Amino acid sequence: HLSIGTANTAIRVETTDTEAALEFIDTAGTAYFRASGDYIKMGATQSDSLTILAGGNVGIGTSSPATLLEVVGTDPVLTIRDTETSGASTNATLRLAESNGVDVLGHYWDINHAGGGALVFKSTTANEAVRIDSAGNVGIGTSTPNKTLEISKSYGATVRISNSNTTVGAGEQLGSLEFYSNDGSGNGTGVRG
């Protein structure tokens, strides 16, 4: 059925089979759009490139996505690219959030690519919590880590190594910091404290 010029313009494809399909053909090949009561599928050359199930799950490279979005392929890469080229802003961001009330953004964590090639983790308050710079240095509480790991706090910065064992015996090791070297000179196996 084809209705044009009415309030609700529509093209209806009906079939007695399990699914209805539209094919789009040009000199480069064929693309298709298939649908049934359980799914919508789109692709080229009869391969399911994109599937939307009735429950809303979206699959790219799979016809049976088990989560809201599932991307399947050999060494798949998912890219979020910022079109701004100045590099001065926070750039592309992945936000992990929960709802606070009905469809209202609640607490969240932002992971974004900051200027200079750094990866930054920010909380709901937009305060930077962790930064990994382009050299691999990790900063907790600082945006300019100068060492492999730098922890900064205005007061009481503490590193804790915790043992979950509730029945610690005499002489039992609670935890350790290990300093290790690949030096093959034979002058020692490292220092442990």
Image: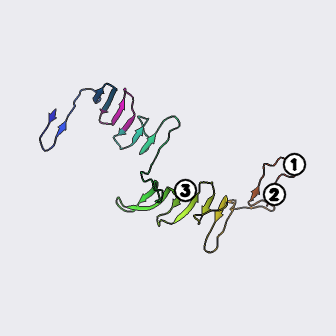
Q: Which residue is mark 1?
A: 186
Q: Which residue is mark 2?
A: 191
Q: Quadrant of residue 140?
A: bottom right
Residue at x 78% of width, y 51% of height: 181
Q: Position of residue 156 (x, y in %)?
A: 64, 73
**Distance Cα–Cα, label 1 vs label 2:** 13 Å
Residue in front for this viewpoint, 177 or 126: 126
In the picture provided, is 126 more to the left or to the right than 153? Answer: left
Residue in front for this viewpoint, 124 or 135: 135
Does residue 66 appear in the picture of this structure? no
Q: Position of residue 31 (x, y in %)?
A: 33, 29
Q: Marks 3 and 1: CB-CB under 8 Å?
A: no
User: Which label sits in the foreground, 2 or 3?
Assistant: 3
In the picture provided, is 171 more to the left or to the right than 57? Answer: right
SS of the residue at dot 3? helix
Residue at x 35% of width, y 58% of height: 103
Circle 3: is it few (<14), some (14-19), or many (20+) Cα within 10 Å? few
Amino acid beneath label 1: Gly
Q: Residue furthest bottom?
A: 155
Q: Which residues are magenta?
A: 34-51
Q: Quadrant of residue 38?
A: top left
User: Which label sits in the foreground, 3 or 1?
Assistant: 3
Which one is earlier in the sequence, the residue at label 2 or at label 3?
3
Q: Which mark is residue 116?
A: 3
Classify 106 as above or below 66: below
In the picture provided, is 86 more to the left or to the right than 140? Answer: left
**Distance Cα–Cα, label 2 vs label 3:** 35 Å
Q: Position of residue 124 (x, y in %)?
A: 46, 64
Residue at x 81% of width, y 57% of height: 191
